[in-house]
Image (cartoon, helix red, strand yellow):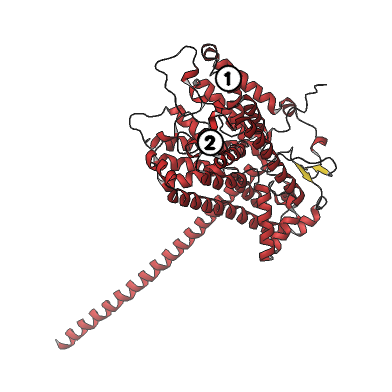
């Protein structure tokens, strides 16, 4: 019995040991199968990701190299405007009793995105959330930010190590308009072989230039917002305006700085800057931001790069200054061209300042201002006529001669430069160093009109859509006011003569004076035409050489 019991125990131990061995074997085998399965899955997933990324890159490169830059930028502004419109519609306005029309909200979104500041709604209707949304729209639609995006597209065309000649010869089309003139004073046209040999330095220089532009963008906004906020907090009269209108100091400071730097012209108050016309310190803070964000941006950028070159001694900054035409960034100019541009800008300001003071010094728009406030206010008004559109006076009350002068200033491109005839100049070479006139123009290019022709067409169309109001209310709806509104939208300025119930020949007891622009009184068709004008003006660089096929002799 004892032997039988011992034998049974041995069998149990044997089977128990066997089961453990078998279990370990099964676990080991299962683990191996799982490892093999996960390994194969990882490889397949990696291959899928690589294939998907390759397809995305291929699509991106096809989009970048083969799609006309005009359609890229037009799509960008339309998409941003649509998203801005949806955001403005979702957020609630400040006034519960009044909700703007859907089309007027879209008009406002387009106006902010194209930095035009044409208004069909009073600014104090918008809530704090809507003001923040408009701030974002103005920022992403500003010229400096969109040019920064264009610079990133240019960088993506270059391989980090060895760019090909095709990559170097492709023009993004986000540079200055083709009509811009460059001075041939620093270097001759670069040899494409030298560019290929220095491809790595070219790539790193474009990358560094992107950081410089981005730093310029944020530093100006940070300093500008801080200074405006500091001024408002220190000056009781300015703070009283914000308190009376229910505006937050931070929102006002950031909104005003972004609008001023991007040359949009929106201000969170109904009266624009008229309510601050006695705050000369605030006006003086905004004037440099106006110039640094548009007309004087190329000289300021060049000065910033020169300072960085002297302080950091980095080779990229020297390369940028010596090869500014190869950077794919049209705001880089030669030193002489930047100097002539700055002189032209200040020359236009001086001419306007002298004429404005001579015509309006003792007029109603200057009532209540002392000598210092008149000088600063006149300077601020004339600086704004070149694309910003902020105003300290009621434009409907100034003389017609000054209005015509402002129309001319609004029409001129922001980087118009006076170049003396004794300075040797040459045109840009947008197509691999060959002059554009040597290329045979397509039929569609020959049909393109000049800028003035398009503006005349737009004015005629608006006169047609608003013909009934022009007959019934000729003092408000006259050709000069319509022309000012169209040229202001084309130049992305925002100047407007507004609408006055007092000028009605047949007084309407229900008419109420409002602070939005003259376009706010137009029909929906007229507003839609002005939306087209704003897009057209924002992308005017693509049609600056139109009309050359038309011989008027």
Q: Secondary structure at mark 2?
A: loop
Could you say which quadrant of the image residue 537 lies in? top right
The N terminus: image quadrant: bottom left
Q: Are marks 1 and 2 in contact (CB under 8 Å)?
A: no
Check the image and report above or below for 42 versus 474: below
The residue beneath circle 1 is: 462
Q: Position of residue 83 (x, y in %)?
A: 47, 38
Q: Secondary structure at mark 1?
A: helix
Q: Position of residue 429 (x, y in %)?
A: 78, 43
Q: Position of residue 100 (x, y in %)?
A: 41, 29
Mark 1 packing: few (<14 Cα in 10 Å), some, or many (20+)? many
In the picture provided, is 414 more to the left or to the right than 388?
A: right
Residue 506 shows in the view: yes
Check the image and report above or below for 263 versus 481: below
Residue 158 shows in the view: no
Could you say which quadrant of the image residue 540 lies in? top right
Q: Which labelled disc corresponds to residue 392?
A: 2
Closer-to-camera residue (503/263): 503
Closer-to-camera residue (403/169): 403
**Which marked residue is nearer to the observer: mark 1 or mark 2?**
2
In the picture provided, is 417 more to the left or to the right than 494?
A: right
Q: Residue at x 51, y 56 (%)?
A: 44
Closer-to-camera residue (465/355): 355
Q: Residue at x 46, y 50 (%)?
A: 229
Mark 2 packing: few (<14 Cα in 10 Å), some, or many (20+)? many
Q: Residue at x 49, y 38 (%)?
A: 267
The C terminus: image quadrant: top right
Give the mark nearer the N terminus: 1 vs 2: 2
């Amino acid at each position: 019995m004892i032997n039988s019991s011992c034998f049974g125990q041995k069998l149990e131990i044997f089977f128990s040991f066997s089961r453990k061995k078998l279990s370990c074997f099964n676990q080991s085998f299962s683990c191996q199968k799982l490892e093999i399965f996960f390994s194969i899955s990882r490889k397949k997933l990696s291959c899928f990701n690589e294939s998907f990324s390759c397809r995305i890159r291929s699509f991106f490169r096809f989009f970048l190299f083969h799609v006309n830059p005009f359609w890229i930028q037009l799509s960008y502004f339309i998409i941003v405007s649509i998203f801005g419109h949806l955001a403005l519609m979702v957020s609630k306005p400040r006034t519960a009793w009044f909700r703007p029309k859907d089309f007027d909200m879209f008009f406002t979104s387009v106006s902010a995105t194209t930095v035009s500041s044409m208004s069909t709604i009073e600014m104090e209707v918008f809530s704090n959330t809507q003001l923040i949304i408009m701030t974002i729209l103005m920022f992403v639609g500003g010229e400096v930010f969109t040019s920064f995006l264009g610079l990133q597209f240019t960088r993506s065309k270059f391989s980090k190590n060895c760019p090909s000649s095709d990559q170097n010869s492709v023009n993004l089309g986000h540079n200055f308009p083709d009509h811009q003139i460059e001075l041939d004073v620093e270097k001759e046209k670069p040899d494409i072989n030298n560019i290929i040999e220095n491809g790595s330095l070219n790539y790193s220089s474009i990358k560094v230039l992107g950081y410089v532009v981005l730093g310029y963008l944020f530093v100006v906004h940070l300093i500008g917002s801080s200074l405006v906020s500091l001024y408002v907090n220190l000056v009781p009269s300015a703070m009283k305006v914000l308190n009376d209108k229910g505006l937050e100091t931070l929102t006002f400071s950031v909104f005003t700085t972004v609008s001023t730097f991007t040359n949009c012209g929106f201000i969170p108050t109904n009266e624009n800057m008229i309510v601050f016309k006695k705050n000369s310190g605030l006006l003086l803070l905004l004037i440099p931001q106006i110039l640094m964000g548009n007309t004087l941006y190329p000289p300021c950028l060049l000065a910033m790069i020169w300072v960085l070159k002297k302080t950091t001694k980095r080779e990229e900054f020297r390369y940028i200054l010596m090869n500014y035409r190869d950077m794919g960034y049209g705001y880089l100019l030669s030193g002489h061209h930047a100097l002539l541009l700055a002189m032209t800008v200040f020359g236009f300001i001086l001419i306007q300042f002298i004429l404005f003071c001579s015509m309006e010094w003792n007029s109603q728009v200057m009532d209540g201002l002392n000598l210092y406030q008149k000088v600063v206010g006149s300077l601020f008004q004339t600086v704004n006529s070149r694309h910003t559109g902020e105003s300290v006076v009621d434009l409907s009350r100034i003389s017609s001669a000054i209005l015509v002068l402002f129309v001319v200033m609004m029409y001129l491109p922001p980087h118009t430069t006076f170049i003396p005839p004794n300075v040797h100049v040459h045109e840009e070479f947008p197509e691999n160093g060959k002059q554009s006139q040597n290329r045979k123009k397509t039929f569609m290019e020959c049909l393109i009109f000049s800028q003035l022709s398009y503006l005349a067409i737009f004015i005629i169309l608006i006169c047609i859509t608003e013909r009934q109001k022009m007959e019934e209310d000729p003092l408000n709806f006259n050709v000069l006011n319509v022309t000012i509104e169209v040229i202001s939208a084309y130049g992305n300025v925002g100047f407007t003569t507004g609408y006055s119930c007092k000028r009605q020949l047949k007084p309407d007891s229900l008419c109420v004076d409002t602070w939005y622009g003259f376009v706010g009184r137009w029909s929906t068709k007229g507003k839609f035409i002005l939306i087209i004008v704003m897009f057209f003006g924002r992308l005017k660089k693509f049609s600056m050489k139109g009309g050359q096929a038309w011989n008027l002799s």
